[in-house]
Amino acid sequence: MVEQTKSKAGDFDPEDSPIANVGKRFYTWATLGTFAGAAFLVSGLWRVLKLLKICELEFTHPVWPLLLSAIVIIAFAFITEPKSQKTTISHKAEKVLITLAITLLVFFTVIGSAAAVGD
């Protein structure tokens, strides 16, 4: 049985208020590790880059959110790689395919939301 470590801050200690318990699980780094969190992060980064216009680049071309999606999802794939568990070549190949699919999913979501909201 895997023993869970307790947070020093008491982040997951039960509260009397049920809604406070929900909040303790929502306001964590794991929330950004979700599909919605990744799509929000890429969308936010793209908007900030468009506003900053670094080196006279306008960042309006769709290649930018594709590149940002790839960076975010690939970084997350490396960060979440298990250290205590040996993964086989087939596991890594499967993770590469899933990473490509999620990258495209985040990219299409960001492009679609930008078109829906308007730039």
Image (cartoon, rainbow, N blue to C red):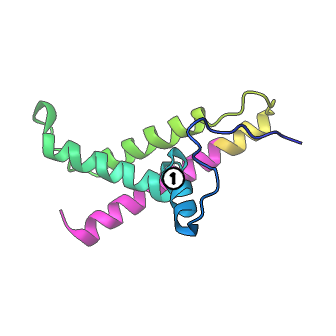
How many numbered dots are placed on residues in this image? 1
Spot occupied by residue 71 in the image (x, y as percentages of width and height): 44, 38
**Amino acid type, callout 1:** Thr
Does residue 19 lie above or below 11 as drawn?
A: below
Does residue 41 lie above or below 56 as drawn?
A: below
* Magenta span: 96-119
Spot occupied by residue 43 in the image (x, y as percentages of width and height): 33, 53
Q: Residue at x 89, y 42 (%)?
A: 1
For residue 15, side relative to residue 82 (left or right) = left
For residue 52, side relative to residue 88 (left or right) = left
Spot occupied by residue 73 in the image (x, y as percentages of width and height): 50, 43
Q: Residue at x 66, y 34 (%)?
A: 81
- Magenta span: predominant SS is helix
Q: Residue at x 48, y 49 (%)?
A: 32
On whether residue 88 falls in the magenta region, the answer is no
Spot occupied by residue 41 in the image (x, y as percentages of width and height): 38, 49
Element type at mark 1: helix
Residue 26 or 39: which is nearer the viewer?
26
Q: Quadrant of residue 59?
A: top left
Q: Which residue is mark 1?
A: 31
Residue 71 or 30: which is nearer the viewer?
30
Can you say which quadrant of the picture contains the C terminus? bottom left
Q: Quadrant of residue 113?
A: bottom left
Judge the density around disc 1: few (<14), some (14-19), many (≥20) Cα neighbours within 10 Å: few
